[in-house]
């Protein structure tokens, strides 16, 4: 009997290898469909936080929970420019009131001026939205960190964005794009957002 138990079944190794491969591919598909995805940044509206060509790891909206002020999110809606997803920062959530003093370049939420170390420069570009603005229920107010070169919720065509249009929250910079000034990848930027 001992000789029969040790007998190799032809093709068993190939079958086990194929089974492991199929399970791995299925797990990866499920993870990247329902959990994580990789998104590329296009354009300079989030400079200096993010550069054109950066690759971000994004948690899908199902795992994000409530969006909070300061989160970097990816939103997609057919009415967005070119119908492509946008990467922006959450400035205010539902029920909060946003006001912008364009002369001073200061953004306030609920009467408190935001300390914005991530902003490339003060906010001087008006895009047509009337302020103060109270963010509607189920929406967020989004702005790019490069305030004077960003089309965002200040534009009445975009306005406050319904949270159902948010793909997810950017959590990690995987691969940096080339810096616009030096034209090189700054590998030290890799990490949590």
Image (cartoon, grey):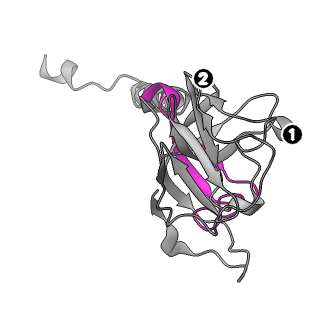
Q: Is residue 43 visible?
A: yes
Q: Which mark is residue 167?
A: none
Give the farthest residue toward the top. Answer: 1
State the residue at coordinates (54%, 29%): 29
Is residue 59 one of those drawn in magenta? Answer: yes
Count of marks overlaid on the render: 2
Q: Could you tell whether 175 is left or right of 64 in the image?
A: right
Q: CA distance from mark 2 to mark 1?
A: 19 Å
Question: Which residue is nearer to you in this view: 141 or 130?
Answer: 130
Question: Which residue is nearer to you in this view: 7 or 28?
Answer: 28
Tell me residue 55's x, y (percent).
61, 55
Q: Quadrant of the N terminus?
A: top left
Q: Which residue is mark 2?
A: 164
Is residue 45 one of those drawn in magenta? Answer: yes
Q: Which mark is residue 82?
A: 1
What segment is highlighted magenta in the picture? 35-63
Q: Secondary structure at mark 2?
A: helix
Q: Are marks 2 and 1 in contact (CB under 8 Å)?
A: no
Dot 2 or dot 1, earlier in sequence: 1
State the residue at coordinates (60%, 31%): 166
Tell me residue 11's x, y (percent).
45, 25
101 above or below 154?
below
Q: Residues within 10 Å of mark 1 (few under 14, many from 20)?
A: few
93 above or below 42?
above
Tell me residue 175's x, y (percent).
57, 62
State the residue at coordinates (65%, 59%): 46
Q: Is residue 37 visible?
A: no
């Amino acid at each position: 009997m001992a000789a029969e138990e040790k007998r190799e079944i032809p093709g068993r190794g190939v079958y086990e290898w194929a089974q492991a491969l199929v399970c791995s591919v299925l797990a990866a598909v499920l993870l990247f469909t329902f959990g994580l995805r990789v998104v590329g940044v296009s354009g300079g509206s989030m400079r200096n936080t993010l550069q054109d060509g950066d690759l971000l790891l994004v948690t899908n909206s199902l795992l994000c929970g409530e969006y909070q002020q300061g989160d970097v999110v990816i939103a997609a809606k057919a009415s967005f420019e070119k119908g492509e997803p946008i990467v922006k920062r959450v400035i205010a959530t539902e029920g909060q009131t946003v006001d912008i003093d364009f002369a001073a370049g200061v953004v306030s939420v609920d009467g408190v001026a935001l300390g914005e170390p991530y902003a490339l420069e003060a906010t001087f570009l008006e895009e047509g939205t009337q302020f103060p603005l109270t963010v509607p229920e189920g929406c967020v107010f989004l702005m790019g960190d490069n305030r004077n070169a960003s089309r965002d919720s200040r534009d009445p065509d975009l306005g406050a964005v319904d949270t159902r249009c948010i793909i997810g929250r950017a959590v990690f910079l995987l691969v940096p794009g080339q810096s616009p000034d030096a034209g090189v990848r700054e590998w030290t930027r890799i990490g949590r957002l």
